[in-house]
Image: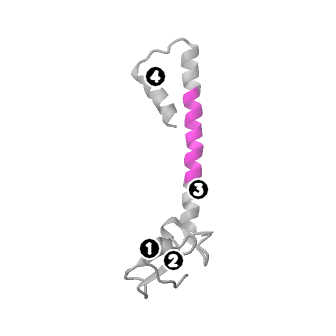
Amino acid sequence: MSSQNCTVDADCPGVFFCYNDVDWLDVESACLCDNWHGWTGDDCLSLGIGAKFHLALVIIMLILGFVALGWGSYTLFRVKQQGKIKMNSTVATLILGLVST
């Protein structure tokens, strides 16, 4: 924990955030770790439980995104291979879904 007085985040060193006029702080302002994102430790570079949970969710979403991209690409390839590709709402939705993935 840094006991440095600050007014904005730029006044704090490194990855610390400036907290001003909060009820739970004994001093007027201080540079502390950003607990919202799960940073902990004296240097704010350790991952807390929140950061680990967020990282796990991002990895799961990344895997699911690649599965959806693969499935959509395979489906579009099969539809094209069968010669059934027509610009209807189903194909347009599939293409737009692939582009957004």
Q: Earlier in the sequence, mark 4 or mark 2?
A: 2
Q: Earlier in the sequence, mark 3 or mark 1?
A: 1
When asked about the image quadrant of residue 27, the answer is bottom left
Query: Tag 1: residue type?
Result: Val
Q: CA distance from mark 4 to mark 2?
A: 51 Å
Q: Name the residue tied to disc 3.
A: 56
Instruction: Tell me the tag on residue 32.
Output: 2
Query: Tag 3: residue type?
Result: Ala
Q: How is the image coloured?
A: one colour
Circle 1: element type: loop
Magenta stretch: dominant secondary structure: helix
Q: Name the residue tied to disc 4.
A: 91
Q: CA distance from mark 4 to mark 1?
A: 50 Å
Instruction: Name the spot of residue 14 as percent of width and height, x first.
Output: 58, 71
Q: Residue at left 50%, top 78%? A: 31
Circle 3: element type: helix
Q: Name the residue tied to disc 1.
A: 8
Callout in the foreground (4, 2) = 2
Query: Tag 4: residue type?
Result: Val
Q: CA distance from mark 2 to mark 1?
A: 12 Å
